[in-house]
Amino acid sequence: MDRDDLRIGDAEREQTMAALREHFAQGRLTHEELDERLDRTLAAKTGRDLTQVTADLPGHQPTTARAVDDWRESMMANRHQVEAMRQAHRDMRRQWHHHGHPWRRHHRGPHPFVGVLFVFMLLSLIFGFGVFKVLFVVWLGAMLFSLVHRRFHYRG
């Protein structure tokens, strides 16, 4: 099958319409010719149809096999680059999962939030006994969670 017989997409139609508008602006086409050619461009289904619309205009180079090959090479290079980035991301996640996150690797002790809860607990002890019970239970829960979290996630 000839490449000019392959179906085209909206991008090719838009490119041809932009070229036709430029030729109209430079005085190569009348308003009626522009309208007629734009209609033919919108109705075009193959590369051959688009080539016929602009065949008599200077500077028009129909899509050649080399241009299609260049596009395919670019797309393949892009796919390889995306796959390399995905692989690097997988490797980084695997390393973090195995060794822990770099910024948390040397973290020991409870979360800073536990200290803030302790301060609120002391203040509630001074200013009101009812709130003290609630904060004490929350503080104990946070300490237990921190202990269990460290036990399972920071072995080593």
Image: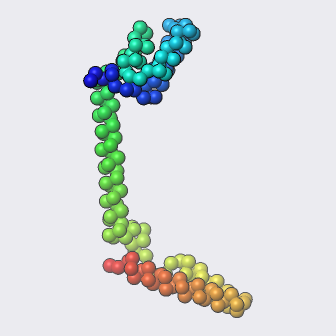
The vertical placement of 98 against 36, above or below, is below
| Colouring convention used in this rendered image of the protein | rainbow
Q: Percent position (x, y) of residue 9?
A: 42, 29
Closest to the observer: 145 or 111? 145
Q: Percent position (x, y) of residue 50?
A: 41, 18
Residue sticking out furthest to the left? 1
Asked if residue 15 can be seen in this view, the reply is no
Q: Percent position (x, y) of residue 152?
A: 39, 79
Closest to the observer: 69 or 108? 69
Instruction: Say which quarter of the image contains residue 4.
Output: top left
Q: Percent position (x, y) of residue 59?
A: 40, 13
In the rendered view of the protein, which quadrant contains the N terminus? top left
Q: How many marks?
A: 0
Residue 116 is left or right of residue 2, and the answer is right
The vertical placement of 41 against 133, above or below, is above
Q: Residue at x 36, y 62 (%)?
A: 93
Q: Residue at x 37, y 21 (%)?
A: 47
Instruction: Say which quarter of the image contains residue 30.
Output: top right
Q: Residue at x 50, y 7 (%)?
A: 28
Closest to the observer: 18 or 91? 18
Asked if residue 8 can be seen in this view, the reply is yes
Q: Residue at x 38, y 77 (%)?
A: 154
In the rendered view of the protein, which quadrant contains the C terminus? bottom left
Residue sticking out furthest to the right? 127
Residue 26 is left or right of residue 62, and the answer is right
The vertical placement of 34 against 13, above or below, is above
Closest to the observer: 114 or 59? 59
